[in-house]
């Protein structure tokens, strides 16, 4: 099992707290507040410097989110721009591998939730689901899996 330093625990705690707050707003208002997200981006960049991340690690961690932003722009918002920004900002701290795994888990969880809601007649195919809570869950599950799976 990978050991986590106290500094990493602090980083995960701060990222998790901001993602939880953004998730609540996304559920209630279907929007993402950019100020806490920007502050988290600055924190993650500075914290990465403190932890000794290279510029390549920092920029590489942003790649999945940059792809999400590009998809949002190309699809005129089918995937929210804020969702891509959330992936970019968390990628600074978590790295591209974990963000990509978390994003894939989030997509699966969103799909399963949508299917259940459609079966229960609580949604239709055009119903937009807030995605940040699924990103939060996906990143959390990716982190747990890394610690548990050898």
Image (tube, rainbow, N blue to C red):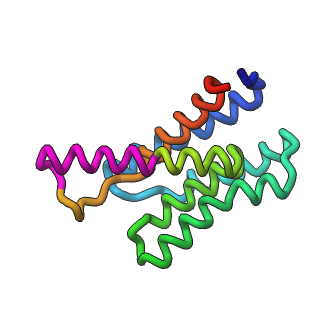
Magenta residues (range): 106-123
**Could you say which quadrant of the image residue 70 lies in?**
bottom right
In percent of width and height, residue 76 lies at 42, 77
In percent of width and height, residue 143 lies at 61, 34
In percent of width and height, residue 82 lies at 49, 61
Q: Nearer the viewer, residue 134 or 49?
A: 134
Q: Nearer the viewer, residue 13 or 108?
A: 108
Count the marks. 0
Magenta stretch contains residue 116: yes
**Could you say which quadrant of the image residue 55 lies in?**
bottom right
**Could you say which quadrant of the image residue 64 lies in?**
bottom right
Q: At 11% across and 49% down in the image, what residue appears?
A: 121
Instruction: Name the outermost residue toward the front.
Output: 150
Q: Is residue 128 left or right of residue 83?
A: left
Q: At 57% across and 37% down in the image, what residue appears?
A: 142
Q: Is residue 123 left or right of residue 11?
A: left
Magenta portion: prevailing SS class = helix
Magenta stretch contains residue 118: yes
Q: At 71% across and 54% down in the image, what residue appears?
A: 61
| Quadrant (top left/top right/bottom left/bottom right) for the C terminus | top right
Q: At 71% across and 21% down in the image, what residue appears?
A: 1
Q: Is residue 29 placed above or below 142 in the rendered structure?
A: below
In percent of width and height, residue 47 lies at 78, 43
Q: Is residue 129 left or right of residue 106?
A: left
């Amino acid at each position: 099992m990978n050991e986590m330093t106290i500094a990493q625990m602090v980083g995960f705690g701060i990222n998790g707290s901001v993602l939880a707050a953004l998730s609540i707003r996304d559920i209630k208002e279907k929007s993402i507040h950019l100020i806490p997200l920007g502050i988290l981006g600055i924190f993650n960049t500075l914290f990465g410097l403190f932890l000794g991340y290279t510029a390549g690690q920092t920029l590489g961690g942003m790649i999945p989110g940059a792809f999400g932003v590009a998809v949002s722009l190309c699809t005129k918002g089918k995937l929210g721009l804020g969702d891509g920004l959330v992936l970019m900002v968390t990628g600074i701290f978590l790295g591209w591998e974990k963000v990509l795994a978390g994003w894939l888990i989030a997509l699966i969880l969103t799909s399963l939730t949508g299917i259940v809601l459609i079966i229960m007649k609580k949604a239709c195919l055009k119903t937009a689901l807030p995605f940040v809570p699924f990103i939060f869950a996906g990143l959390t599950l990716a982190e747990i899996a890394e610690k548990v799976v050898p």
